Amino acid sequence: MANPTTSLIATAGLIGGYGTARWTGNRRLGGAVLALAGAGAAYRWRRTVGTGGAAALAGLYVGAFGGSHPLAKRIGAWPAVFAVTGVVAVASAVAERGAAGGR
């Protein structure tokens, strides 16, 4: 895929970061995956939805990571990761679609 959507990059960061930490037992490595994908998504968001939109989406991305922890205590780790990832992916797609429509 030569030009993945930003929601796919964010999805890869949230799911890949958790999966990496879980399967390797190395939380720092999982955090690195999360951070690298988040930085890549933020760069793309800034280009597509502007600085303000990128800041809001990046805040949602970080908030989703943080929010997945207490949510995991209620519904389980993987369901929590999938739930917050879905929120970020949809928000990203909606924001980018809205920005594209405004051009």
Image (tube, rainbow, N blue to C red):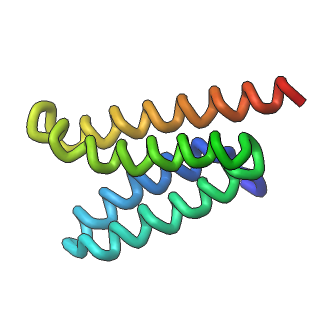
- Whether residue 85 sits left or right of residue 101 in the image: it is left
Placement of 98 over or under 25, stated as above or below: above
Q: Is residue 27 above or below residue 52?
A: below
Which image quarter: residue 95?
top right
* Relative to 38, 15 lies left or right: left
Q: Residue furthest front?
A: 52
- Residue that appears at 19% across and 36% down: 71
- Which one is nearer the viewer's eye here, 27 or 54? 54
Q: Position of residue 52 (x, y in %)?
A: 64, 43
Task: Tell me if 88 is positioned left or right of 103 in this view.
Answer: left
Residue 44 image position (x, y, % from top left): 69, 53
Looking at the image, residue 10 sits to the left or right of residue 15; the answer is right
Can you say which quadrant of the picture contains the C terminus? top right
- Identity of the residue furthest to the left in this view: 73
User: Residue 73 location in percent, x, y?
Assistant: 9, 39
Q: Residue at x 54, y 31 (%)?
A: 91
Quarter of the image where one finds residue 43:
bottom right
Residue furthest to the right in view is 103
